[in-house]
């Protein structure tokens, strides 16, 4: 033994040491790490590392470049980052090119309002100047969004995102319109579309939202002009009226017909000297509502088909109203609105089976079903309402009035005329403009459409200026219908969750032709020309490609800066009359057409990407939006969907399940979270929630997530702290020579690795989180770490038993960091930095750990049983502590009585039991007992000053009189090795 002075005991304990701090300080440390990544050019470094690997392409749905990001935008992008990073770590090459949707109405409106504030009008500026301001606004907005997305730790091509307003993109948008033209799927026609009176433009299906709205509900009588005896002899000579019901009295001046169902039974019933026709099932309800007596006398019953092509007179105008039969007629509610709703909207819609008469007021210029049946019966598509929603001069009595303002006067007018039977206020779900939130109307105006079915049925041969439009649809027959191709294609796509395919199928089955024209300027112009002399319209794919090449060089502004002749190929002459003078179409394309083009404009344009993509992931509103428009363009270009899989995520709501609004004060603002808690907390919140459903967020919820974060951080910190001075190459213990509990920990690691990799593969990030959280807090913190602490702290540093635990700890910390990396991008990188074995400058260049296929099941089962006994022992120790029998568990001795298998199990691990229970002594006896019997008593001997265990052998050493025999051995080793 050494003759030097004895060692200072405190200094011989191996206390944990690491630069990985307990406090995360994410708000400060995250920006520093982002700078470090920028210095490494980390995204580019990942690209180089992944070169040559199999590709996995997530195609980014472009957020609208108008405002700052909110929690929903953050979640969308974070989920995408989870996918890209996890696929990268699975061994794919997964580049991420983010994009921005830059054109469209919201930006125009914003710029108009900004101009108004400066006392200027849009009309004061040239179109080019106005477009330049829109472009600048979009650029500013997208730069601020980019800053926030980077702050969230999302890696991608941020220096060169795709912009729908870039020259190349605008050119491709025009070219894709050409592809539709080529296939004969484009036509210009007048059919009703959603129309915003305030913004004075057509709106796409995806641009309307349904909200509660109060309308007047009216029952109106239309006198039958045809001979009533044609319906039933009993009605001969009677004054007969067909009763209609509507919630849009303002559409009555445009009434041209009444639709009934051919197979429903209708009744003619008497009231005074008049006879009214309604569906038999509704006779009593209508009579009660309109005060027509309790038991109306029915004169005749007949199928609706009997009324086909008979004529009524308009309720007050000198004009006929044709009786027609249609399958769309229902016995209640608003059939027309229903067809425009997708499944979820329809489910939310309260059904009002009491309303209606079974005779449907039909105005072909103001409703989708009205239009379809009106076309079939050869009615005019009559729409006497101008862009601003005022009646045109040919509307008697109401010319110049705004339609919504005209509702009440029309109701009053009908009451005075004696044609109104009843009116009341009526609450229903009604479409509103997504932008200005005002109720919209259905209005037929000349618009460009993409035909879902047969284009020619809805083709108008001349537009409002008498221009000839007949030459677009000649290729239609050979290409078949877009709807059938789309319906076929969606069955080949993997929808996650699986109900996505039903939602998509329902949407596609019901959707009307796609109205792609907008009466606006901030977008890609519809590249069509009209002959100035004979009015022939030129929509020709070769001409469009020529124009697109100009856009490619000069941007879409060329449509406004160049003359028509300058845009057409040189010497282009009119096929109809040989003239060379042209005018340009003034409408632009729907922004959904823009974003629908992205797969072509981006995936096919960048060498690191490919078409089709592997996956799209967006919110449920994109079934009608981007999922749909992308599919349409994919089919026009390649007869294929542009995605192999589509994932849908839910909405972000507040803690009570309400939508978040800044004005309501319940919005969680990402920017504030960055500064208070750190972006990592938003990321962990995304992972902790099941995003397939709606996801709830609030300050309190984020606080809970922060607590979870802290626990995981502490777990990592324990592992790192105990790896101080560990040299993986020289100090690792071979697996077979490791202590059994260390091998057990690695078997548990293997189990969690398999679960986590499977969850990543299935995009189930909440299951990744749950598995890792349980592993960190239960398996590691509450069990393994507790048990190995004594060995790590009190054994000599180089003791093989200690090295065994460290070998396991390194494997665990390394694997934990890798598995956390897609989610906790900052923290995992920080763990990585503090690992002794890291071989790359960032964890984001590493791959996932692998799980071995053959799990050590017998080891796991054996230890599961030991831990069950441990739980009982810990409970008994707790009781003893409460009873003041013992203080800390090291003051205890545990006596176990067992028999049979349990006894054998305990015998096999007899030496480990005191460490397993964290007590100073364990005694094991054989006794006939069903369960293991546990007795707690005070430990024998004295407390060792160094390890705090009790031992009867404390005091055996003269050199170290206050320590136990285990510590003496450790101290001798320390002295020997220095
Ligand atoms: Zn609007
Ligand atoms: Zn001509
Ligand atoms: Zn000791």
Image: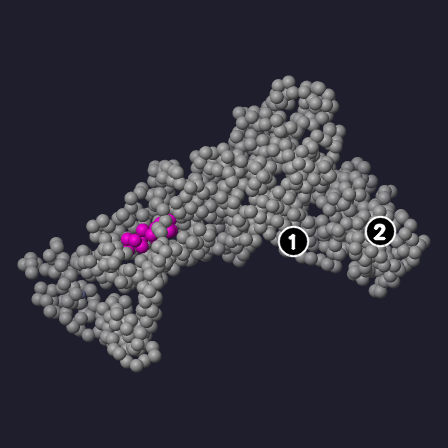
Residue 974 relative to residue 33: left or right: left
Q: Position of residue 238 (x, y in %)?
A: 92, 54
Task: Name, please, the residue furthest toward the top.
Answer: 571
Q: Which residues are magenta?
A: 809-821
Could you say which disc has been placed on residue 346 in the image?
1
Camera sees residue 846? yes
Estimate the x, y position of residue 964 in percent, counting from the top left: 16, 67
- Camera-side residue of 642 and 770: 642
Q: Looking at the image, which is closer to me, 401 or 462?
A: 462
Q: Quadrant of the C terminus?
A: bottom left
Whether residue 845 is situated above or below residue 9 in the rendered picture: above
Is residue 815 covered in magenta?
yes
Q: Quadrant of the N terminus?
A: bottom left
The circle drawn on residue 730 is none
The dominant secondary structure in magenta is: helix
For the point 11% across and 69% down, which residue is it? 956
């Amino acid at each position: 033994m050494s003759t030097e002075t004895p060692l200072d005991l405190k200094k011989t304990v191996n206390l944990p040491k690491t630069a990985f701090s307990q406090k995360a300080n994410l708000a400060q440390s995250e920006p520093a790490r982002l700078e470090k990544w920028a210095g490494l050019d980390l995204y580019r470094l990942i690209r180089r590392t992944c070169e040559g690997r199999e590709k996995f392409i997530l195609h980014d749905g472009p957020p609208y470049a108008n405002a700052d990001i909110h929690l929903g935008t953050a979640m969308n992008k974070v989920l995408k980052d989870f996918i890209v990073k996890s696929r990268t770590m699975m061994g794919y090459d997964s580049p991420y090119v983010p994009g921005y949707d830059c054109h469209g109405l919201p930006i125009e409106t914003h710029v108009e309002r900004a101009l108004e504030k400066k006392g200027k009008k849009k009309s004061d500026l040239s179109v080019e100047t106005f477009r330049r301001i829109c472009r600048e606004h979009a650029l500013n907005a997208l730069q601020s969004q980019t800053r926030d997305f980077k702050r969230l730790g999302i890696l991608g091509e941020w220096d060169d995102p795709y912009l729908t307003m870039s020259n190349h993109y605008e050119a491709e948008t025009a070219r894709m319109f050409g592809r539709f033209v080529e296939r004969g799927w484009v036509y210009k026609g007048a059919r009703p579309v959603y129309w915003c009176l305030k913004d004075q433009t057509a709106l796409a299906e995806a641009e309307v939202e349904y909200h509660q709205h109060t309308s007047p509900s009216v029952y109106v009588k239309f006198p039958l002009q045809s001979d009533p005896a044609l319906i039933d002899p009993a009605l001969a000579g009677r004054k007969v009226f067909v009763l209609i019901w509507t919630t849009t009295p303002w559409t009555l001046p445009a009434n041209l017909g009444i639709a009934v169902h051919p197979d429903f039974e209708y009744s003619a019933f008497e009231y005074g000297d008049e006879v009214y026709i309604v569906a038999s099932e509704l006779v009593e309800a209508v009579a009660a509502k309109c005060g027509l007596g309790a038991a109306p006398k029915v004169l005749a019953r007949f199928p609706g088909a009997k009324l086909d092509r008979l004529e009524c007179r308009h309720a007050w105008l000198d004009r006929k109203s044709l009786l027609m039969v249609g399958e769309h007629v229902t016995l209640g509610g608003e059939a027309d609105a229903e067809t425009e709703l997708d499944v979820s909207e329809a489910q939310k819609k309260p059904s009002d089976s009491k309303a209606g008469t079974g005779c449907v007021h039909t105005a072909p210029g103001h409703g989708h079903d009205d239009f379809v049946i009106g076309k079939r019966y050869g009615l005019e598509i009559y729409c006497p309402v101008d862009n601003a929603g005022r009646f045109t001069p040919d509307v008697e009595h109401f010319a110049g009035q705004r339609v919504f303002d005209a509702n009440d006067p029309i109701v009053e007018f009908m009451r005075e005329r004696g044609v109104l039977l009843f009116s009341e206020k009526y609450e229903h779900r009604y479409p509103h403009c997504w932008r200005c939130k005002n109720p919209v109307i259905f209005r037929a105006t000349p618009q460009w459409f993409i035909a879902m079915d047969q284009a020619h049925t809805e083709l108008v041969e001349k537009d409002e200026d008498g221009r000839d439009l007949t030459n677009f649809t000649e290729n239609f027959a050979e290409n078949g219908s877009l709807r059938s191709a789309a319906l076929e294609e969606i069955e080949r796509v993997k929808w996650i969750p699986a109900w996505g395919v039903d939602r998509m199928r329902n949407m596609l089955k019901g959707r009307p032709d796609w109205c792609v024209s907008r009466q606006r300027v901030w977008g890609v112009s519809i590249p069509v020309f009209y002959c100035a002399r004979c009015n022939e319209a030129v929509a020709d794919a070769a001409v469009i490609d020529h124009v697109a090449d100009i856009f490619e060089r000069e941007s879409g502004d060329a449509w406004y800066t160049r003359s028509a002749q300058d845009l057409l190929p040189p010497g282009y002459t009119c096929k109809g009359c040989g003239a060379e003078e042209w005018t340009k179409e003034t409408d632009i394309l729907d922004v959904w057409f823009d974003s629908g083009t992205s797969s072509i404009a981006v995936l096919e344009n960048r060498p690191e990407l490919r078409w089709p993509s592997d996956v799209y992931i967006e919110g449920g509103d994109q079934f009608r939006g981007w999922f749909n428009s992308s599919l349409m363009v994919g089919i026009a270009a390649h007869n294929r969907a542009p995605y192999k899989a589509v994932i849908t995520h839910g909405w972000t709501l507040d803690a009570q399940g309400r939508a978040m609004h800044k004005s309501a004060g319940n919005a969680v603002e990402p920017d504030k979270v960055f500064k208070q808690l750190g972006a990592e907390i938003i990321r962990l919140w995304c992972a902790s929630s099941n995003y397939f459903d709606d996801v709830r967020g609030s300050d309190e919820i984020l606080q809970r997530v922060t607590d979870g974060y802290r626990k995981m951080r502490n777990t990592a910190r324990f592992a790192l702290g105990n790896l101080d001075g560990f040299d993986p190459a020289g100090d690792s213990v071979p697996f077979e020579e490791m202590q059994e509990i260390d091998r057990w920990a690695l078997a548990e690691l293997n189990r969690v690795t398999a679960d986590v990799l499977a969850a990543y593969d299935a995009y189930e990030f909440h299951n990744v989180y749950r598995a890792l959280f349980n592993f960190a807090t239960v398996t590691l913190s509450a069990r393994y770490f507790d048990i190995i602490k004594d060995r790590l702290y009190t054994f000599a540093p180089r003791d093989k038993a200690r090295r065994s635990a460290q070998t396991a700890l390194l494997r665990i910390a390394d694997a934990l960091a890798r598995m956390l990396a897609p989610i906790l991008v900052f923290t995992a990188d920080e763990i990585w930095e503090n690992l002794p074995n890291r071989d790359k400058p960032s964890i984001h260049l590493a791959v996932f750990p692998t799980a071995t296929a053959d799990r050590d099941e017998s080891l796991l089962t054996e230890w599961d049983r030991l831990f069950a006994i441990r739980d009982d022992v810990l409970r008994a120790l707790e009781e003893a502590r409460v009873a003041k029998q013992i203080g800390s568990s090291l003051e205890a001795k545990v006596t176990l009585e067992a028999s049979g298998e349990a006894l054998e199990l305990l015998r096999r691990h007899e030496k480990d039991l005191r460490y397993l229970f964290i007590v100073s002594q364990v005694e094991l006896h054989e006794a006939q007992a069903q369960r293991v019997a546990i007795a707690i008593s005070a430990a024998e001997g004295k407390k060792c000053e160094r390890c705090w265990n009790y031992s009867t052998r404390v005091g055996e050493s003269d050199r170290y009189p206050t320590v136990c025999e285990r510590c003496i051995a450790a101290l001798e080793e320390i002295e020997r090795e220095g």
